[in-house]
Image (cartoon, rainbow, N blue to C red):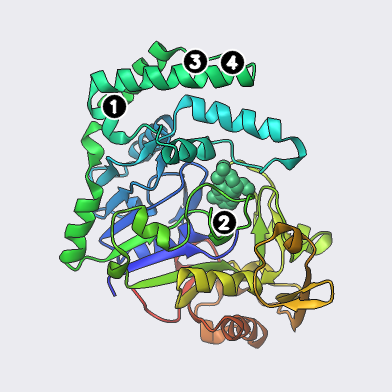
Amino acid sequence: MSTLVLVGSQWGDEGKGKITDFLAEKADVVVRYQGGTNAGHTLNVAGAVFKLHLVPSGILYPGKSCIIGNGVVLDLPSLLREMEALQERGVDLSKLRISDRAHLVMPYHRLLDELEEKSRGSAKIGTTLRGIGPTYMDKITRRGLRVADLLDEKELETKISALVAEKNLLLEGVYRAPGLDAAAVVAEYSRYADIIRPFIADTGLLLDEAVRAGKKILFEGAQGTMLDIDHGTYPYVTSSSPTAGGASTGTGIGPTRIDRVMGVVKAYTTRVGDGPFPSEISGETADRIREVGREYGTTTGRPRRIGWLDTVVLRYACRVNGMSHLALTLLDVLTGLKTVKICTSYDYNGTLLAHMPASLHVLSGCRPVFEEMTGWEEDLSVIEDFADFPPAAKNYVERIAALTGMKIAIVSVGPGRRQTKLLENIF
Ligand code: IMP
């Protein structure tokens, strides 16, 4: 198999960065297809910690092509900071390419994200405040600036001036906030254009050539299925398509060229931001999982909400992504719990629901139906082979496979590359 899409099966933060990093070793090309700096991947390589927001995880392997696809929204100052930090640590960026069709997150998008969230009051989404929603909004309403616009200085000036004037009406008139100085924004982005120019390419074309040459391509999803604009818990979602279909629209590679989709799923569930979360728990067990799993946002530092594994969510993710395999992460975090629970269905006013409801009102009224399993005491992070895992941990993994009809290809029990157990080689 030469093209694999890796997607988050829950509300993001499933440990995709670690699995991407593991698979990237075998890939020729690693591609990001949606989202922006709302994503954060923490990678642990030989004791060194790297935090990536926009640059694909494959960058840490010399010689891999890394592509930021057209579906990504690009915050140039953040990208440049990230590139600089990587270069300072000796990482080679010569094979990084950025789509000329990707949209730019502009200073007014970040401001509007914050102002819109404030104006929603208690109905806020809990966004990362990185300007993601307003940028995608401008893309869809055809007011966006694209990377290609950076290449023509005159046009860049004309477009930025018109857009800033329009946004100032909104900032000043509606939100009573100070407007932006168009000339300063033009100057800032012209500076970025000069730095970024060598990295800009028609990445759809590059990917097509790679597919034709039989190269191994890894599509790296950010966020997760339940945050998808179409399939997630709308409106408590992000504004892009993290699901597998987004890999096609976000890169320019048609769906028939994608061989396989693997979901990354955490052994329990977390969520940052607001919105319903049926298997959520609080108290001692939740606090313990949060501390052991270091469940604090990579991008915002917010403590994540904790819940048991929800297989209603997971089965839904398997379906909308067309997955065949799962990579199970953070199984080691559950060590030491007397019992572990899995949510198998929802109880809505006495009716059992086996599928995700579209209505958030219904979802908010759903009570989880749990199956309880015996826990284990052994430290999984130091066991070399999955075959030597305690029977209770193996049972838990097998139960997830049975409840979803998926094969478990990878089990991860720690941040290091060696703590990743490959049960089936699919890439
Ligand atoms: P936005 O993507 O910043 O607009 O935020 C929309 C929702 O998606 C909020 O609930 C965020 O907390 C959530 N979100 C965005 N990116 C991530 C991520 O990488 N991991 C987990 N949640 C995320």
For the residues labelled 2 and 4, the Cα–Cα distance comes to 36 Å
Can residue 144 be seen at all in this image of the molecule? yes
Quadrant in the picture for the N terminus: bottom left
Residue type, label 2:
Asp
Residue type, label 1:
Ala
The residue that mark 3 highlights is 180
The extreme front residue here reads: 141
Tag 1 near tag 2, CB within 8 Å: no
Looking at mark 2, is its residue's CB closer than 8 Å to ligand 1?
yes
The residue that mark 1 highlights is 193
Task: Indicate whether 1 appears above or below 65.
Answer: below
Closer mark to the observer between disc 1 and disc 3: 3
Residue type, label 4:
Glu
The residue sitting at 56% across, 21% down in the picture is 170
Q: Which picture quadrant has residue 256?
A: bottom left
For the residues labelled 3 and 4, the Cα–Cα distance comes to 10 Å
Q: Residues within 10 Å of mark 1 (few under 14, many from 20)?
A: many
Q: Earlier in the sequence, mark 1 or mark 4?
A: 4
Q: Residues within 10 Å of mark 3 (few under 14, many from 20)?
A: some
Q: Earlier in the sequence, mark 3 or mark 4?
A: 4
In this picture, residue 336 sits left or right of residue 33: right
For the residues labelled 1 and 4, the Cα–Cα distance comes to 28 Å
Q: Earlier in the sequence, mark 1 or mark 2?
A: 2
**Residue 243 in the image: x percent, y percent?**
47, 61
The residue that mark 4 highlights is 172
Residue type, label 3:
Leu
The residue sitting at 45% across, 73% down in the picture is 322
Q: Which picture quadrant has residue 339?
A: bottom right
Task: Indicate whether 405 appears above or below 319.
Answer: below
The residue that mark 2 highlights is 13
Q: Secondary structure at mark 2?
A: loop
